[in-house]
């Protein structure tokens, strides 16, 4: 990442004058927690890109890739390739994520579909109300609009 690409986030953290000075001299700033946030964003972005690269792969119950997937198999595979280990099932994945609000969701976060307190499906949030997921038998990995309000969001950390 170049110094100029860091300017927007640095401006929010270090103030406009400091960020512009840092950009001009090619410096950087250390902020507690920033490295963790940056690496988490990188992992989530990579996982999202990996899931998208599997577009059209057939659904198969219990499959974890690289050619066939079920819902949690796709998320497990995508995050594993991005460098983060997740448990096998959607419910287990929900229990291992940092739970966040719909307002806080970002591309790369996990979207958990639930009925009451039971999680039954998971996908990777792609932005604009859409997810990458492996829906069901007879379908393929695809980008689809979130079709219900019965969802919870989790961030892999």
Image (cartoon, grey):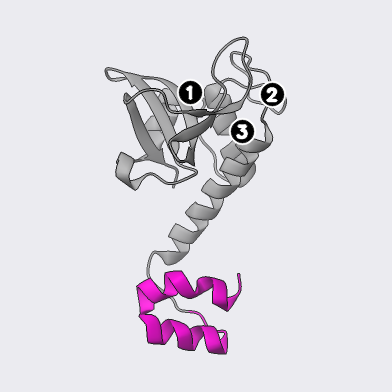
Q: Is residue 102 above or below residue 29?
A: above
- 47 relative position to 100: left or right: right
Q: Main secondary structure of the magenta part?
A: helix
Residue at the spot 54% in from the left edge and 19% down from the top edge: 135
- What residue does disc 1 label? 89
The residue segment tinted magenta is 1-28
Q: Which mark is residue 68?
A: none
Q: Is residue 96 magenta?
A: no
Query: Disc 3 to disc 1, how far (Cα)?
Result: 12 Å
Q: Is residue 6 above or below residue 70?
A: below
Say which quarter of the image contains residue 155. top left
- 41 relative position to 15: left or right: right
Element carrying mark 2? loop
Element carrying mark 3? helix
x, y percentage for residue 111?
A: 42, 32
Front residue of 55 and 27: 55
x, y percentage for residue 82?
A: 61, 45
Q: Residues within 10 Å of mark 1 (few under 14, many from 20)?
A: many
x, y percentage for residue 50?
A: 64, 40
Q: Residues within 10 Å of mark 2 (few under 14, many from 20)?
A: many
Does residue 11 appear anywhere in the picture?
yes
Mark toward the viewer: 2 or 3 = 2
Q: Residues at badges 2 and 3 in contact (C-beta under 8 Å)?
A: no
Q: Residues within 10 Å of mark 3 (few under 14, many from 20)?
A: many
Does residue 100 appear anywhere in the picture?
no
State the residue lying farthest toward the left.
116
Q: Is residue 149 above or below residue 104?
A: above
- What residue does disc 2 label? 57
- What residue does disc 3 label? 77
């Amino acid at each position: 990442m170049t110094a100029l690409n860091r300017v927007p986030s640095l401006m929010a953290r270090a103030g406009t004058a400091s960020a512009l000075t840092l950009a001009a001299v090619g410096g950087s700033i250390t902020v507690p927690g920033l490295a963790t946030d940056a690496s988490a964003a990188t992992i989530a972005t990579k996982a999202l890109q990996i899931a998208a690269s599997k577009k059209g792969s057939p659904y198969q119950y219990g499959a974890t890739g690289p050619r066939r997937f079920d819902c949690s198999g796709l998320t497990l595979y995508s995050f594993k390739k991005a460098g983060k280990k997740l448990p096998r099932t959607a419910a287990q994945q929900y229990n291992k994520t940092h739970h966040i609000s719909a307002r806080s969701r970002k591309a790369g976060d996990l979207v958990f579909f639930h009925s009451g307190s039971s999680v039954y499906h998971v996908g990777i949030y792609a932005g604009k109300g859409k997810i990458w997921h492996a829906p069901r038998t007879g379908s393929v990995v695809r980008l689809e609009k979130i079709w219900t309000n019965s969802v919870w969001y989790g961030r892999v950390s």
